[in-house]
Every structure is written in C-alpha cells, then in structure tokens.
Image (spheres, rainbow, N blue to C red):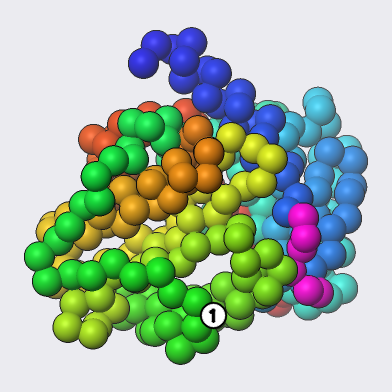
C-alpha cells in the first residue's frame, strides 16, 4: 500500500468517524456542540468529546475550550475522555490537557483494512465455538472476562451493550468465544451507519488461551458480518499486542490515539 493510499484511509477516517453521532442515540445520552467539539454526556461508562480538527484554536482560546468541557462534565459529576490523535494540532495540546488535570492512558494505533482483505472462509479453533450473544447474562460473563484479563471489571459494559442494542439492535454485534462453556474471548463490531466503516472492539483473551488464533477468528467473523452488510473498511484502535496480528491480516497504521481522561476529584 502506497503512502497516498494510507493518506486516503486517514482522510476517510477523519471525515467519516471522528465526529459521527449515532442515530438513534441510546436513552439518556445527550449530544452538545461547542465550537469544533461534539460532546457526549450521559453514557454508562463516562462521556467523551470528539472533533475532526480544532480549526486553528490554540493558546488561551484552547485552554478556555478545555475548561468548558471540564465544567460541563463536572456539573454532572461525570468522567470523560478527550481522544487525542497523533496528527492533531496544535503540538502542545497534550501539555495543555495534562495541565488541566487530564491523565493519559495507553496509546493505541489506528489501523484500517479493506473488508475484502480480511473477510473470507470462517476461521475455526479446535475446542472453541464462536457465538453471537444478546442476553444480559452473556454481557455479565463478558464483564467477568474483562475482570480476569485486566483486573478491572469495566463497570458499565453490560449496561452499554444493552443501551446500544435497545437504541438500534442492528448497530452492534457482540461475539464470544467459548471453550467447554467458558468465555475465553469477547469482541464486538459496530456498524457505523452512513459511512464506509465497521469498527472492531474488544478482543480480550484469557492468558491460557492466547496464541491459538482465537482473536484472529473473531476478527474474521466480524469482517464477514461487515462484508454481508456492504461495508468496505474495517477500523481498530489497536493495542501494542493486537497491532502485529492485525497487520499480518492486512491492516495498516494511519495514526495513533491516546485517551486523555478527566475524572471528578
């Protein structure tokens, strides 16, 4: 893939995903505009702000924009994420976020692939079954998996799944990989309506089951779903662990993303 191809993928990502507002929204979620920012409040796992670019805002004006976001979420006693991309400007934006009280989480790499490069014959793993799920019980089992993998139960994950499915059941598909009835991996795909993209999330796998191709199988399964629905591109915010796997499957890196999180207190 040429540099021009990578640049075109990044341009599509910026234009189609970075300020996308789902329609319909989950119950209780509110969207507000503040200059170049789109602010999401009332989400079960904390809010966030999105933007395509900041339109040249910098210096004291940028500090004031950041302060307004903190004020809006602090009034609701709600944590939120400012999703910073590696190609965002101005260059001192990370410093200004940290000075305002944000904490940076682990950097991830935005990788994109044509659906046709990843979809194909369903991948199988001996002893493992992939199953699409939609019950609260299965969502709680996914929360338990996350707790086992990360030491964090990712509180609100089950509620997030339920609220998204209640708003638009066709917008998300959740997949578990089971072995002898135990959930050993969980992943989901969001179908970003009126864009070219399906986005892939999750993929946490129990340590004892890593290295067997389970994550790759969930990627292929979700790519096939995207192909069936006519989507042409797949996007993942990839961790350092999953990035090499995804690149071997045909994904290419276009930028990085770092969550900057502000929390009350």
Q: What segment is highlighted magenta in the picture?
A: 23-28
Q: Position of residue 29 (x, y in %)?
A: 79, 68
Position of 49 compared to 161: left or right?
right
Whether residue 130 appears in this view of the structure is yes
Q: What residue is shown at x 62% (from left), y 47% (from top)?
A: 192
**Left or right placement of residue 165 versus residue 64 in this view:** left
Magenta span main SS? loop
Front-most of residues 229 and 19: 229
In-image side of 177 versus 198 (left or right):
left
User: Does 145 sit left or right of 104 as displayed?
Assistant: left
Extreme-front residue of the structure: 228
Could you tell me how many numbered marks the image carries? 1
Q: Which residue is mark 1?
A: 158
Q: Is residue 108 visible?
A: no
Residue sitting at x 46%, y 89% = 137
Image point 18% across, 70% down: which residue? 128
- Compare residues 190 and 11 and report the one nearer the observer: 190
Task: Work out whether 7 lies above or below 175.
Answer: above
Residue 249 at what x, y percent from top left? Answer: 27, 37
| Mark 1 nearby-residue class (10 Å; few <14, some 14–19, many ≥20) | some
Give the SS element for disc 1. helix
Give residue 114's position: percent from left, percent from top: 42, 30
Which of 264/252 is in front? 252
Question: With respect to residue 194, does 158 lie above or below?
Answer: below
Asked if residue 82 lies in the magenta stretch, the reply is: no
Which image quarter holds the N terminus? Answer: top left
Q: Is residue 225 above or below residue 116?
A: below
In percent of width and height, residue 131 lies at 34, 70
- Magenta stretch contains residue 25: yes
Q: On the rendered image, what quadrant is the C terminus found in?
A: bottom right
Residue 146 sits above or below residue 109 on the image: below
Say which quarter of the image contains residue 245: top left
């Amino acid at each position: 893939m040429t540099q021009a191809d990578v640049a075109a993928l990044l341009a599509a990502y910026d234009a189609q995903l970075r300020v996308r507002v789902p329609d319909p929204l989950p119950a209780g979620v509110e969207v507000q505009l503040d200059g170049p920012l789109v602010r999401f409040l009332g989400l079960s796992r904390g809010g966030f702000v999105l933007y395509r670019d900041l339109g040249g805002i910098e210096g004291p004006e940028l500090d004031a924009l950041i302060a307004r976001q903190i004020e809006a979420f602090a009034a609701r006693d709600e944590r939120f994420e400012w999703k910073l991309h590696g190609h965002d400007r101005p260059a001192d934006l990370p410093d200004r976020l940290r000075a305002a009280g944000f904490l940076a989480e682990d950097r991830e790499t935005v990788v994109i692939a044509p659906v046709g490069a990843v979809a194909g014959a369903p991948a199988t793993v001996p002893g493992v079954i992939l199953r699409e799920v939609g019950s609260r019980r299965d969502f709680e089992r996914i929360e338990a998996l996350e707790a086992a993998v990360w030491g964090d139960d990712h509180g609100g994950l089950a509620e997030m799944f339920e609220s998204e499915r209640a708003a638009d059941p066709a917008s998300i598909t959740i997949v578990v990989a089971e072995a002898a009835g135990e959930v050993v991996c969980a992943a989901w795909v969001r179908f970003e309506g009126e864009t070219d993209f399906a986005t892939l999330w999750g993929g946490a796998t129990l340590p004892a089951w890593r290295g067997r191709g389970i994550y790759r199988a969930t990627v292929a399964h979700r790519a096939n779903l995207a192909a069936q629905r006519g989507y042409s591109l797949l996007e993942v915010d990839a961790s350092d662990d999953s990035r090499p796997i995804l690149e071997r499957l045909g994904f290419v890196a276009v930028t990085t993303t770092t969550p900057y999180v502000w929390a009350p207190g």
